[in-house]
Amino acid sequence: MQFVEIKDLKPGMRLAKPIYNKMGVMLYDRNTSLAASGIKNIENFGLIGLFILEPAEPLPPLSEEELRFEQFQTIYMFQIRKIMHLLQNDNEPETLHELVADILKHYGTLDHKMRFTQILRSSADYVYKHSISTAILSAMIANVLGYTNREKEHLVTAALLYDMGYLFVPRYILDKKDALTDNDYRIIQECRKRGFQLLYPDTNKYLLNGEVLNTIQQTHTIFAAQTPNDLQGKNFSKNALVLTVADEFDN
């Protein structure tokens, strides 16, 4: 299996993973041989590339749960993108509670281990896919830690929105292949603050739960620390610590 950028796709290449639309409908199944017309359609999906099977490579085993996981990630990504855009424009995020409930339904009550995989990301969709993955991971961790349903809801809501400020991070920083500079980190922190202001009660008439806002604010404090010494003497909620771990795991 190899990663191939969209511009390098050629007819006859076989897909290693399925492609879904925003409703979760499968457009191209695994092992599909690409035709010229299919490549043209895929170019319009905004993907940066695809995983392609080698010419003689057999189709690797993939469980039904793993297939559903990739499908749900795609559906959730489109949903959180709409929610964030509504918040950016001072409109009510009507489906936020539904998204939280669906993530908890599928990943907040698991009684077994599950293989966690990421879907491909570009700088254009990074914040949406990262937020979804972090929310799913947070739901799984909260379940193992014995959270109540209400506690899970607060944590997953925070996980979906804590990095909304990345919508304002300049593309040149998101696309960097070299190590980020101190100035890059400063800009990212400023963008995080800007995203948080969209959620804060003074500017957000939808009044997110105070526990959600507190978790986001504490998580930002942890991210802003330059060294472990910067966090000495500070106390953080369990939610903030879980969210930080989920964020780091996904990164």
Image (spheres, rainbow, N blue to C red):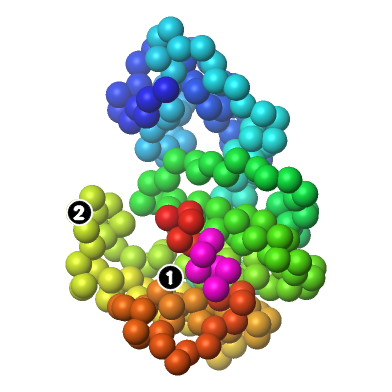
Give the position of the N terminus as an image quadrant: top left
Q: Does residue 143 lie above or below 218 as drawn?
A: above
Disc 2 designates what residue? 178
Q: Nearer the viewer, mark 1 or mark 2?
A: 2
Query: Residue 41, how many percent across, how many down?
Result: 46, 26
Q: State the mark number for residue 106.
A: none
Q: CA distance from mark 1 to mark 2?
A: 22 Å
Type of amino acid under label 2: Asp
* Identity of the residue drawn at 55% across and 53% down: 133
Disc 1 designates what residue? 165
* Identity of the residue drawn at 39% across and 51% down: 124
Q: Disc 1 or 2, which lies upstream in sequence?
A: 1
Which quarter of the picture shows residue 174?
A: bottom left
Q: Does residue 104 lie above or below 205 as drawn?
A: above
Disc 1 to disc 2: CB gap under 8 Å: no
- The residue carrying pointer 1 sits among few (fewer than 14), some (14 to 19) or many (20 or more) residues within 10 Å by Cα, namely many
Residue closest to the eye, 202 or 192: 192
Helix, strand, or loop for circle 2? loop
Q: Is residue 164 visible?
A: no
Which quarter of the picture shows residue 40?
A: top left
Query: Residue 66, how many percent across, how many down?
Result: 64, 35
* Identity of the residue drawn at 28% across and 71% down: 185
- The residue carrying pointer 2 sits among few (fewer than 14), some (14 to 19) or many (20 or more) residues within 10 Å by Cα, namely few
Question: Start and end of the magenta stretch?
Answer: 241-246
Q: Is residue 144 visible?
A: yes
Query: Residue 200, how many percent across, how many down?
Result: 55, 84
* Identity of the residue drawn at 40% across and 15% down: 54
Helix, strand, or loop for circle 1? helix
**Side of 241 relative to 69 (left or right):** left
The verdict on residue 245 being magenta is yes
The verdict on residue 118 being magenta is no
Please, what is the dominant secondary structure of the magenta stretch? Answer: helix
